[in-house]
Amino acid sequence: MEALLQKIETYRREIEAFPSNENDAAEQFRIAYLGTKGLVKSLMGEMKQVPAERKKEFGQVLNEFKQFAEAKHEALKAAGAQHAVSTTATIDLSLPGDVIPVGSRHPISMMRHRIIAIFQRLGFSVAEGPEIEDDWHNFTALNLPEYHPARDMQDTFYISTDPAWLLRTHTSNIQIREMEKGILPLRIICPGRVYRNETISARSHCFFHQVEGLYIDENVSFADLKQTLYYFVQEMYGNDVKVRFRPSYFPFTEPSAEMDISCQLCKGEGCNVCKHTGWLEILGCGMVHPKVLQNCNIDPEKYSGFAFGMGVERPALLKYGINDIRLFSENDVRFLKQFTGLV
């Protein structure tokens, strides 16, 4: 009993000497003395060691000590509040605040969202897939078997070769994965980042962005493809833009075509960007090859479809008058802040 009373007296002197010049002195005091693991709780736990005939006496001393500690805590809180008021009084509230820079969307994101919005108005839904892909979904299922010469058209970043895993070279892998689900009809667009082992220059990069589209249903024709793309071009570039289709070759579509529009920079008169032809190629397209449908367990006798694919960087270059594709990925704030407020 005497040892406990001596301990309480020692704690009392500690409390009287507790520093009050700390910003969080009141909170530090509460944790040390009044918290769930504080000294007051600890002393209450030692009540069981006091003889029964002296419990009342010890209880009175302990209760007085608790009230003393609580009074000290209130005094520390009051001192802290007074210090905060005096600090605030030294602040000139009439001074203007610091300017907070306004952020903006990246020009690639703005262009991608604009492309997606146009096709969503035609009933296309957005589908996504992995950027690290296997050979089947990136090549073979798209009518590009091993050693097919068309594979040389896309310099590929391989992660491993046995088995073959790679960074996807197009977002067509998403189309294959969606067709394999067997839910028809299918009308999707597939935006995403793709990778090709190309020399970085003002006009090309080792990674870029694509938006591909796919429509599978009964009796889908090339005329449906053309009307879909006519609508897209007019919504994107205006009603005055001229359009032409040129025969082309893609292993996964037959027939295949490339779509050109009149150059938006020179209005078709000829410039360095369009190589003085007055035309710019903006996308490739065609009817889905029957072999691709078979690879995805879709009956080509019953279903047909069209597909198209376009880069996002080229429309962004035209839209915002940018002459170097590398600016999109350099994270230069001086470049990015020019797009603040744009949508």
Image (tube, rainbow, N blue to C red):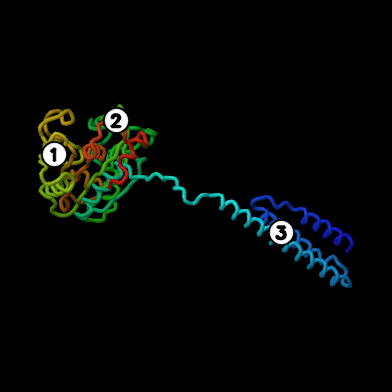
Q: Earlier in the sequence, mark 1 or mark 2?
A: 2
Residue at the image position 64 percent from the left and 55 percent from the top: 80
Q: To which residue does mark 3 refer? A: 37
Q: Earlier in the sequence, mark 1 or mark 3?
A: 3
Question: Residue tagged by mark 1?
Answer: 261
- Give 29 or 152, whichever is nearer the viewer: 29
Q: Residue at x 10, y 35 (%)?
A: 268
Q: Secondary structure at mark 2?
A: loop
Residue 155's label in the rendered image is 2
Residue mark closest to the camera, 2 vs 3: 3
Residue kind at label 3, given as amino acid type: Lys
Residue 192 in the figure: left or right of residue 251: right
The total of numbered circles placed on residues is 3
Above/below status of 96 relative to 34: above
The answer to whether the residues at label 1 and label 2 have Cβ atoms under 8 Å apart is: no
Q: Toward which corner of the image does residue 138 lie, by quadrant?
A: top left
Near mark 3 (Cα within 10 A), the count class, few <14, some 14-19 or many ≥20, is few
Q: How far across and down, in percent of the image, does residue 184 sit?
A: 23, 56
Residue 31 drawn at (x, y percent): 69, 57
